[in-house]
Image (spheres, grey):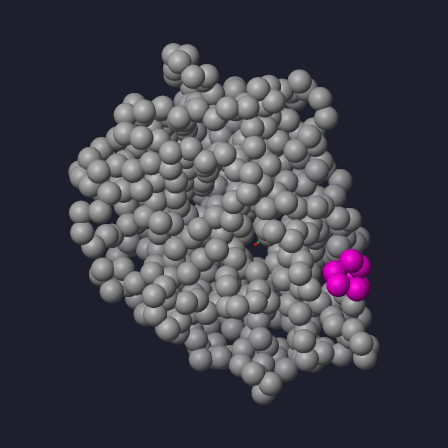
Amino acid sequence: IAETTAWRPAAHFTARATWLNDPNGLVYHRGTYHLFFQNNPHGSSWGNISWGHATSTDLVNWTELPVAIPCTDEEMVFSGSAVVDHRNTAGFAADTETALVAVYTSATTAADGTGRQAQSLAYSVDDGATWSRYAGNPVLDIGSAEFRDPKVFWYGGDDGHWVMVVVEATEHRVVVYTSPDLKTWQRVSAFGPAHATGGVWECPDLFPLRVAGTQETRWVMIVSLNPGSFAGGSGTQYFVGDFDGVNFTPEHLTASDQLVDYDWLDYGRDYYAAVSFSDVPDGRRFMVGWASNWEYAGETPTSPWRSSMSLVREVDLVRSPDGRHRIRQRPVLPNDASRLDLPPGATAVASGGDSATDDGGAADDGGAAGVLVFSMRVDAGDSATFVLDGGADGEPADGEGLRITVDGNAGTISCDRTGAGDTGFHPAYASVDWAPLPPSDDDADVELRIVVDASVVEVYTGDGLVALTELVFPARPYRRLTRG
Ligand code: FRU
């Protein structure tokens, strides 16, 4: 398909020629960030699920490596995490070695068709280049078909312990297990159901996060939900609270049954299964999500690759005027991103977009127009619509584009992709998505940052307190922003 080349993003990771979904095993080790991912090494649709592997030193430029943990006749390798076993608690490392340990879900099907999901280990003693399955797998099996996506971290100092958060998906429950050695696990507590429960709970995470401008930290529980998210289909909610090594206690739960009253990491259609990197120095926290939605992920019109990750986002907490803590997200952008400020009433057009004209050539030429970052503001209380499209300077709009509207009266921001290029590949795709504008102290302007990278658009407002991620499949790469 000719368009596929122009739709391949530059800074959002895609597999070269295959399917991907969730990010897995995010870990920093010896100067390198490892991104594993749910991958079908043999095709462009979900299946043969294995852990693909990519690495980066800057969180923007990724190199795809051979599949790290392939599926076997016995098991598919579902989502999970990876840690550096600094204390060699599992005993996988010889004297001078350090083991990376992946904790994943073994998804198996018995002869009678019943499914089973249990937690297993694989390890690498060559800095992630090659992986071996632990002979004692699985290490945690409760006889369930809906028990998956372990996220593991070390809690405490030398006398600390491993903690695993893992979901009982259909129970809407995150279960906490602890272990001294990654091999034996004890159930110690559970969290949920809470807030959105209109679908299965998947891909949990739990980590401490700094409150900006203070010496304080809070713990954040991440829970992905499919379907039943705010924007429809799959999405990611979070809870802020405390964790004592055993119990997670949220500091704010509402009895409301309105999805808008819960905390969402992203209000767009395309941000799922987001989890954070382990072992990043200096207490920094980076997250990545899968930039798609289970409602139509299998039908998006790219080939042979299908789906990308979000940008990597650095997160922290902000204490809002209402006293609650909310996650702030700032994307890690490539140094060569084109940055364009949009003055009131004006148009900004990125130059150099001609290279984006697709020639139907090699599918791995690195993407369309590069990454564009548009910044603009809307006066407090005002309303404004911005149209992102593929037009050249001075050319009239042809009606195709993504429409982004700030509604000062309603206090909302919305993204309308019903007229954004190819919308016909799945009936659930075309949508108008919205978010409440974040609470602010005074009559502050609404600042917007729109990151455009071929088929992925990420909209940030309130300095990253609200994010919307949307896939688009334009006829011509989007590189012009016009105030409507
Ligand atoms: C989330 C998910 C996980 C599972 C994986 C399978 O998107 O459903 O719960 O481990 O994908 O690919």
Q: Position of residue 104 (x, y in %)?
A: 66, 62
Q: Is residue 152 visible?
A: yes
Does the magenta stretch mainly form a helix, a strand or a loop?
loop
- Residue 463 as seen in the image, left or right of residue 61: left
Q: Is residue 199 above or below residue 377?
A: below
Quadrant (top left, top right, bottom left, bottom right) of the N terminus: top right
Quadrant (top left, top right, bottom left, bottom right) of the C terminus: top left
Q: Is residue 128 magenta?
A: yes
Q: Position of residue 177 (x, y in %)?
A: 55, 75
Q: Is residue 435 magenta?
A: no
- Residue 428 as seen in the image, left or right of residue 438: right
Q: Is residue 434 visible?
A: no
The structure residue drawn at horizontal position 26% and vertical position 57%, both measured from the top left corner, is 256
Q: Is residue 313 above or below residue 280?
A: above
Q: Position of residue 92 (x, y in %)?
A: 77, 74
Q: Is residue 192 above or below residue 96?
A: above
Residue 95 or 401: which is nearer the viewer?
Answer: 95
The structure residue drawn at horizontal position 48% and vertical position 41%, both measured from the top left corner, is 270
The structure residue drawn at horizontal position 75% and vertical position 54%, both measured from the top left corner, is 68
Q: Position of residue 271 (x, y in %)?
A: 48, 46
Residue 57 or 475: which is nearer the viewer?
Answer: 57
Q: How many marks?
A: 0
Magenta segment, which residues? 126-133
Residue 479 or 436: which is nearer the viewer?
Answer: 479
